[in-house]
Amino acid sequence: MPRVRRRTQGRPPMTVAALIPVRDFATAKQRLRGVLDDATCAGLAAAMLDDVMTAVAAAGRIDERFLLGGDDARRVAARRGWQCLPDPGGGLSAALHSAAAQLVARGIGTLLVLPGDLPRVDAQCIDALLAGHRGGVTVCAAARDGGTNALLLTPPDAIDFQFGDDSARKHLEAGMAAGLPTRRLTLTGCARDIDTADDLRELCLLQPAGRTGAFLQASGIAARFTAAERRSAGTEQ
């Protein structure tokens, strides 16, 4: 049975919190380990997280900022002046359920969940996402697999979390079943997370800015994937 929540008409969204789940860097980006070594995967994950945090920090309507995770999340949060919630285990959806309950207890009215591997997201994208939120459930879907690349919830525990393939549809359906307003937004900065070699190749061709772009250049990833693309197109001199 879907949980049914009472809608609160005419109430302000109150405090808005952003939450980024963080997997320890040593085990991050497992699907890239066929093309990158462990240290490079860890460095890429850290660089992308840094860029997402920078975008959140520059957004105009975020009141509180949290990471969710273990030792690496705690270290990064302390360095950046963010708060950190512990990951209790049990998978991403279970961890977010625990985090949402804690945030509700703190008086958070609206929760924005963003993955840490959206190197093209910026403050303008986040502001547009918040401006488009009408309460209830708002999602931005991943272009590749229909996963959830941004999730806005009012209240933070409005629905059960169902992350994974096609989760954007599942989150919207859960909101509708609970009688909540739902919206699906399409924003370029939230469209592509970086999980596969094809994702990484496309990212290199886009030449992103920020710490991710600098890491792609310094690590040689950009040169490697660009050269491979030229060979594939038959344009290498």
Image: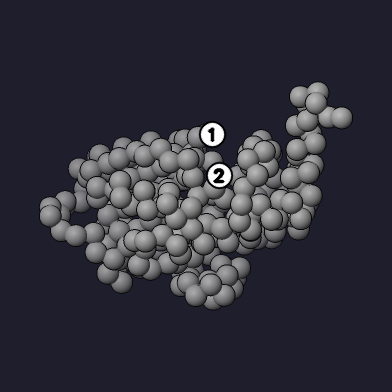
Is residue 90 among what the camera can see? no
Quadrant in the rendering for residue 44: bottom right
Residue 83's label in the rendered image is none
Is residue 193 among what the camera can see? yes
How many labels were placed on the picture? Answer: 2
**Furthest-right residue in view?**
237
Quadrant in the rendering for residue 197: top right
Quadrant the N terminus occupies: top left
Whole-percent x and y of residue 49?
57, 58
> Are the residues tagged 1 and 2 within 8 Å (C-beta)?
yes
* Mark 2: amino acid: Asp
Is 64 situated left or right of 71 in this image?
Answer: left
For the residue labelled by badge 2, is the local secondary structure a helix, a strand or a loop? loop
Foreground pick, 122 / 91: 122
Q: Which residue bears the numbered disc 2?
A: 193
Image vertical order of residue 82 relative to residue 123, above or below = below
Foreground pick, 234 / 177: 234
Q: Residue at x 50, y 50 (%)?
A: 121
Q: Which residue bears the numbered disc 1?
A: 144
Q: Which residue is drawn at 37% across and 43% down?
A: 139
Whole-percent x and y of residue 16?
32, 62
Quadrant in the rendering for residue 61: bottom left
Is 12 situated left or right of 190 in this image?
Answer: left
* Mark 1: amino acid: Arg
Give the colouring mode of the picture: one colour
Q: Gap between marks 1 and 2, in whole Å?
A: 9 Å
Whole-percent x and y of residue 191?
49, 40
Q: Which residue is drawn at 27% across and 41% down?
A: 182
Image vertical order of residue 99 relative to residue 35, above or below = below
The crowd level at tag 2 (other Cα within 10 Å; few <14, some 14-19, many 20+) is: many
The crowd level at tag 1 (other Cα within 10 Å; few <14, some 14-19, many 20+) is: few
